[in-house]
Amino acid sequence: MPANLTPEYKKAEEAFRQAKTVEEKIACLERMLAVIPKHKGTDHMQGDLKKRLSKLRDAEDRTGGKRTDPYAIKVEGAGRAVIVGPPNTGKSSLLAALTNAKPEIADFPFSSTRPMPGMMPFEDIQIQLIDTPPVTSDRVETYHSNLSRAADLLLCVVDISAADPVAQLVETGAIFENIRIKFSSVKPDTPQLMGMAEKLTFVAVNKTDADEDDILLGEFTRAARTELRVFPVSAATGAGLEELKREIFKALGVLRVYSKVPGKKADLSAPFVLPVGSSVMDVARMVHNDFADNLKFARIWGSQKFEGQKVQRDYVVQDKDIIEFHSE
Ligand SMILES: Nc1nc2c(ncn2[C@@H]2O[C@H](COP(=O)(O)OP(=O)(O)OP(=O)(O)O)[C@@H](O)[C@H]2O)c(=O)[nH]1
Ligand SMILES: [Mg+2]
């Protein structure tokens, strides 16, 4: 059975070939495992990747290298955003406002002591958010680096009611550069598993409810002169959170499609989530490999194509398309 490997997998494989340290190799193998298409045709390869990964982890332990990160969190949902920032800015409050998680929230700094994940519903999908303990120039942990590297984007939270929110942003950026993560206004084309990793970063300017005339916000925007996108929000009142959610979804670079059996209504309860740019064939592979092997054409209902228009296997699907597969 063909493995039908995606370009994303091939990039991770290429990075693995160039990896020099055990740590880099582990990061690449983890990425390969995360993005390998999951179907019968790749069962053997998945087993092989897991074996190589466990061998490398053993080697790392024997050589006294870094042990497996006790704070590692499995990527779940349509993508991952990691919440970072200085103490007391409202990182945990944002996690609590956006997800089902119940983090510790307190009116003093350093209240969070470990990373905490939560799932953020957005329309009909879930996005993983991870709250992290605060960073300061002398307090940044391995998990900050590991979780952020595996993130689709970072959300740097600053506090508009603090003495100097602009300094909070600048200092957090510098702290992350020290651990080889660079805040970026764009998503890099290829996953950067080694060296300095550029990460798409949004700035959440929190506690805007404490700034009734938006004067502080205006000052922040002028003084920060950052290329990063800035989202004024309030975890306390919920202001700005809907827009933030939508933009996080857009930044993931994924789309949703629904499959439909001929003669029946589409199942709109369970979307398939794929990278933007995926074709009908990519969807077929995800739904069931047999569909992909025998696929002749598909019919699509959606924003670009209407009323079951016939399309070929290489047709690039759009967010919210409904697809009906035909094998003859
Ligand atoms: N007025 C106002 N207060 C907020 C808002 N968000 C958080 N707070 C308060 O700010 C304080 C710190 O909130 P946390 O969510 O614990 O902040 P944190 O960034 O997770 O703090 P550390 O984990 O210690 O770094 C608490 O007293 C919150 O109630 C907001 O939007 N508006
Ligand atoms: Mg916290």
Image (cartoon, rainbow, N blue to C red):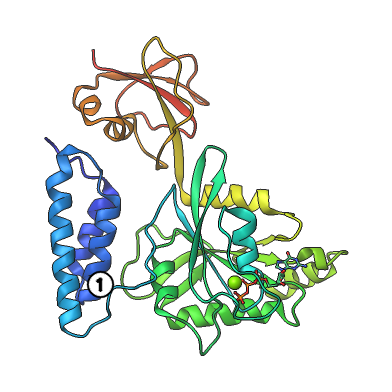
Q: Local crowd at mark 1 within 10 Å, few (<14), some, or many (≥20)?
A: some
Name the spot of residue 208 as percent of width and height, x first: 77, 64
Q: From what the image shows, is residue 251 above or below residue 95?
A: above
Residue flagged by tag 1: what amino acid is it?
Glu
- Ligand 1's quadrant: bottom right
Name the spot of residue 45 as percent of width and height, x first: 14, 50
Q: Quadrant of the C terminus?
A: top left
Residue 139 versus residue 276: which sits nearer the camera? Answer: 139
Q: Quadrant of the N terminus?
A: top left
Residue 257 seen anywhere in this rendered image of the structure:
yes
Number of numbered markers: 1
Q: From what the image shows, is residue 77 above or below residue 269?
A: below
Residue at figure coordinates x 76%, y 82% from the top left: 163
Q: 145 left or right of 207? A: left
Extreme residue in the bottom direction: 138
The image quadrant that residue 323 belongs to is top left
Residue at figure coordinates x 42%, y 60% from the top left: 188
Q: 26 left or right of 104? A: left
Name the spot of residue 213 as percent of width and height, x first: 88, 64
Extreme residue in the top direction: 263
| Residue underneath mark 1 | 24
The image quadrant that residue 261 belongs to is top left
